[in-house]
Image: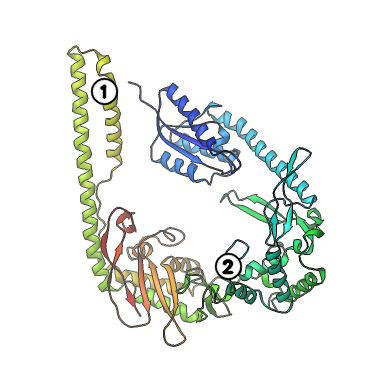
C-alpha cells in the first residue's frame, strides 16, 4: 500500500511594497499541486516582507526545526528563489533536507537536485546582485538631485510624491520648524561647552520627543564622527547631503549586515542649501570642540572610546529604571540612564566601586547561593515534581499503547472481512485511515523516552562551593582566567542595584542562573555558551544581612531540560522553593 506523502508548504515575499495576498497566492498554487499528486498538507510556513538574501527568517527556521523532528516527508514551494536567492544558503538548505531524506519540490523547477541547485542558485544570486546594483544606482541618482535616498533625519519631513511628466517622483524634503529649533539648540549648547549628556538630560526633563519619538541619550547627540552618525555630525544640517559614506555586507556566520566606512574619494557630497538649519560658523565651532575631546591616555576621540569589559559587565541592572549599570569613572559603576538621559528617566545617581561589587558577588556565589538548608529543601521538592511528571509520561505511554492495540485490532478485522468475501472497495478508505493512524501512533511511541529521574543530593552544595572557589582562584591564573571568567559570568542571571532608603549606598540583589548553578553542582559543563543564556527559574541572593532564608516562588509550571534544569513552562502551576541567600 502506497504511503501518503506528508507535505510542508513554504511561501515568502520580499518587501512591504508587495501584496500581503502574495503568500496566499503561492500557498493556493501549492495546494492545487498537492491535490493533484494525492499528497497531504501537514503545515504551511511563511515569511512576510523578508528578503531572501538571508536564511535568518522565523518561518524557514521553524520549518527546519520541524524537518528534524520528522513532521513531514516533502517540502514544497513555488520556486527556489522563494526559499533563498543565495546560492550558498539554498545549497545548505538542500543539504540538510537531503540528510533528513526529505526531497525539495517547487512548482517551477520540479524536484530539486544538485544540478538544479548549481544552475538556478547561480541565476538567483545574480538576480540578487543585479537588484542591489540597481537599488544603489537609483539611490545615487536621487542623492545627486538632493533628494532622500532612503530614511530621514530629525529636523526634516519627507514630502509626498509629485507627478513630473507622468512619472511620480519621491524623496523631496522640507525643514520641520519645530524639530529644527531643537537641532539649533543642541548645536548652540554644545558649542557653549555643555556636554551631550547634560543636553539630553534637559531635553528629557522638558519632555521633548527624540528622533524616534522616545527619549534622548548622549550617544544620540555625539554619535560617531568618522561615520557621520549622531545629531552633531549630520552635515545635512549645514546644507550638505553626504551619501555613500558607508557600505554594507552580510556576515556569512550571523546573516547580519555589517557596515564599513567607504574611502573618501567615492563619497558623494551634494550641496543642498535649502535644507540648511545651522550656519557655517556654528557648524565649525562644533567641529573644533569635537577635535579637542580626545583621551589624553590613548589619543582616541571620545566618541570612539571603548571601555574594557569587567567581570560582570552587561549583567548589572538599575533597580529603579531597569537600565544597565556601566563604568562612569575609572573604578565605579553607575546607572547609564540616569547619567545619559537625566532625572526625567532615572534619579539613581549612586555609585558602587568595581572592587566592592565583584567582591560581594563572588562572596555570595561561593558561600551563600547554594546554602545546604536551601539545597536540601529544593532537592526534596524537585523530587516530588519530577515524580509527578514521570507519572504523567507513564500515563501518556499507556494511553498510546491502548489506542495502538485498538487500531491494530480494527485493522485486523477489516482484513478478515476481505478474506470472508467483503469487497475491498467498501473498506479500503477505512483501512487506509487506520494504517495511517497506526504509523502515527508508532512514530509518537518511538519518540517517547522512558522516565529517567535525575537524583539531586543535598551534598552537591559542597561540591558547588569547591568548584566556585576553584574558579575564583583561576581568575588570578593566566592560563585559567578566560575559562574561569566565562564560567562565573554564566552563573549570574543579573545583578540588581537599588538605592538604600538610608545612607548613600546601594543594595545588591543577585539573581543566579539556576541552570548553570545546578550543572556546576553536578559536575556538568558550564559556561562557554553551553547554558549561558538558557532561561530558568532564578536564584535570588540579597547581599546586606547575615540571614539565610529559603523561600517559595510561584514558577509558572515546569518542564525538564537535559533532565536537570527546571524551566518555566505554561501548562501547570507548581510551588518549588527558591534558593535564597543573604550575606
Side (left or right) of 393 relative to 347: left
Q: Residue at x 54, y 80 (%)?
A: 332
Q: Which colour scheme is used?
A: rainbow
Q: Is residue 411 visible?
A: yes
Query: In what element is the residue under mark 2?
Result: loop
Q: Give the residue number, with chain letter if any, for mark 2.
A: 215
329 vs 220, nearest the viewer: 220
Residue 328 x %, y %:
57, 77
265 vs 10, nearest the viewer: 10
First reached walking from the N terminus: tag 1 or tag 2? 2
Q: Give the residue number, with chain letter if any, for mark 1.
A: 430
Q: Can residue 300 be seen in this view?
A: no
In the rendered view, tell whether residue 280 sits above or below residue 67: below
- The quadrant of the rendering that contains the N terminus is top left
Q: Which residue is drawn at 40% across and 75% down?
A: 509
Residue 61 x %, y %:
48, 44
Side (left or right) of 260 relative to 322: right
Q: Which residue is drawn at 73% across and 57% down?
A: 174
Mark 1: few/some/many CA within 10 Å (<14, 14-19, 20+): some
User: In the rendering, which numbered label is found on residue 17?
Assistant: none
Residue 114 x %, y %:
55, 31
In the rendered view, tell whether residue 299 sits above or below residue 115: below
256 vs 453, nearest the viewer: 256
Query: In what element is the residue under mark 1?
Result: helix
Asked if the residue under mark 2 is in contact with the one under mark 1, i.e. CB atoms within 8 Å, the reply is no
Amino acid at each position: 500500500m502506497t504511503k501518503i506523502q506528508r507535505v510542508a508548504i513554504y511561501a515568502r515575499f520580499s518587501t512591504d511594497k508587495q501584496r500581503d495576498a502574495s503568500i496566499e497566492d503561492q500557498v493556493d498554487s501549492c495546494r492545487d499541486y498537492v491535490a493533484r499528486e494525492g499528497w497531504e498538507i501537514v503545515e504551511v510556513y511563511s515569511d512576510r516582507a523578508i528578503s531572501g538574501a538571508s536564511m535568518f527568517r522565523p518561518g524557514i527556521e521553524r520549518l527546519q526545526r520541524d524537518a528534524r523532528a520528522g513532521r513531514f516527508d516533502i517540502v514544497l514551494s513555488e520556486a527556489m528563489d522563494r526559499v533563498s536567492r543565495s546560492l550558498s544558503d539554498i545549497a545548505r538548505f538542500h543539504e540538510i533536507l537531503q540528510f533528513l531524506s526529505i526531497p525539495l519540490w517547487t512548482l517551477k523547477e520540479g524536484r530539486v537536485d544538485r544540478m538544479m541547485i548549481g544552475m538556478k542558485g547561480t541565476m538567483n544570486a545574480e538576480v540578487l546582485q543585479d537588484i542591489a546594483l540597481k537599488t544603489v544606482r537609483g539611490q545615487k541618482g536621487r542623492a545627486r538631485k538632493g533628494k532622500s535616498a532612503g530614511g530621514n533625519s530629525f529636523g526634516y519631513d519627507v514630502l509626498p510624491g509629485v507627478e513630473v511628466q507622468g512619472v511620480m517622483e519621491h524623496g523631496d524634503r522640507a525643514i520641520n520648524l519645530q524639530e529644527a529649533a531643537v537641532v539649533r539648540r543642541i548645536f548652540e549648547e554644545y558649542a557653549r561647552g555643555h556636554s551631550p549628556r547634560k543636553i539630553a538630560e534637559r531635553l528629557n526633563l522638558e519632555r521633548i520627543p527624540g528622533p524616534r519619538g522616545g527619549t534622548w541619550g548622549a550617544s544620540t547627540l555625539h554619535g560617531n564622527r568618522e561615520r557621520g552618525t549622531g545629531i552633531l555630525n549630520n552635515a545635512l544640517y549645514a546644507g550638505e547631503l553626504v551619501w555613500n559614506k558607508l557600505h554594507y555586507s552580510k556576515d556569512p556566520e550571523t546573516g547580519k549586515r555589517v557596515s564599513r566606512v567607504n574611502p573618501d574619494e567615492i563619497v558623494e557630497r551634494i550641496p543642498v542649501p535649502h535644507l540648511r538649519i545651522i550656519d557655517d560658523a556654528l557648524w565649525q565651532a562644533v567641529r573644533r570642540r569635537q577635535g579637542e575631546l580626545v583621551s589624553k591616555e590613548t589619543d582616541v576621540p571620545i566618541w570612539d572610546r571603548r571601555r574594557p569589559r569587567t567581570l560582570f559587565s552587561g549583567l548589572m541592572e538599575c533597580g529603579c529604571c531597569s537600565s544597565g549599570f556601566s563604568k562612569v569613572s575609572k573604578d565605579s559603576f553607575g546607572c547609564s540612564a540616569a547619567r545619559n538621559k537625566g532625572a526625567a528617566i532615572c534619579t539613581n545617581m549612586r555609585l558602587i566601586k568595581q572592587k566592592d561589587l565583584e567582591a560581594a558577588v563572588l562572596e555570595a556565589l561561593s558561600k551563600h547561593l547554594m546554602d545546604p538548608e536551601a539545597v536540601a529543601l529544593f532537592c526534596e521538592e524537585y523530587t516530588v515534581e519530577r515524580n509527578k511528571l514521570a507519572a504523567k509520561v507513564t500515563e501518556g505511554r499507556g494511553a498510546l499503547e491502548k489506542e495502538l492495540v485498538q487500531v491494530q485490532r480494527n485493522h485486523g478485522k477489516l482484513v478478515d472481512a476481505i478474506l470472508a468475501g467483503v469487497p475491498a472497495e467498501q473498506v479500503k478508505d477505512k483501512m487506509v485511515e487506520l494504517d495511517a493512524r497506526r504509523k502515527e501512533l508508532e512514530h509518537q511511541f518511538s519518540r517517547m523516552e522512558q522516565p529517567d529521574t535525575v537524583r539531586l543530593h543535598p551534598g552537591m552544595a559542597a561540591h558547588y562551593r569547591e568548584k566556585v572557589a576553584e574558579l575564583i582562584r583561576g581568575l588570578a591564573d593566566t592560563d585559567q582566567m578566560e575559562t574561569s571568567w566565562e564560567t562565573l559570568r554564566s552563573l549570574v542571571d543579573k545583578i540588581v542595584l537599588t538605592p538604600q532608603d538610608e545612607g548613600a549606598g546601594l543594595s545588591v540583589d543577585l539573581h543566579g542562573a539556576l541552570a548553570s548553578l545546578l550543572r556546576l553542582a553536578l559536575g556538568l559543563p558550564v559556561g562557554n555558551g553551553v547554558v549561558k543564556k538558557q532561561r530558568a527559574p532564578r536564584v535570588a541572593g540579597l547581599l546586606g544581612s547575615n540571614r539565610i532564608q529559603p523561600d517559595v516562588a510561584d514558577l509558572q509550571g515546569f518542564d525538564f531540560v537535559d533532565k536537570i534544569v527546571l524551566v518555566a513552562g505554561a501548562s501547570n502551576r507548581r510551588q518549588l522553593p527558591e534558593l535564597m541567600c543573604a550575606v
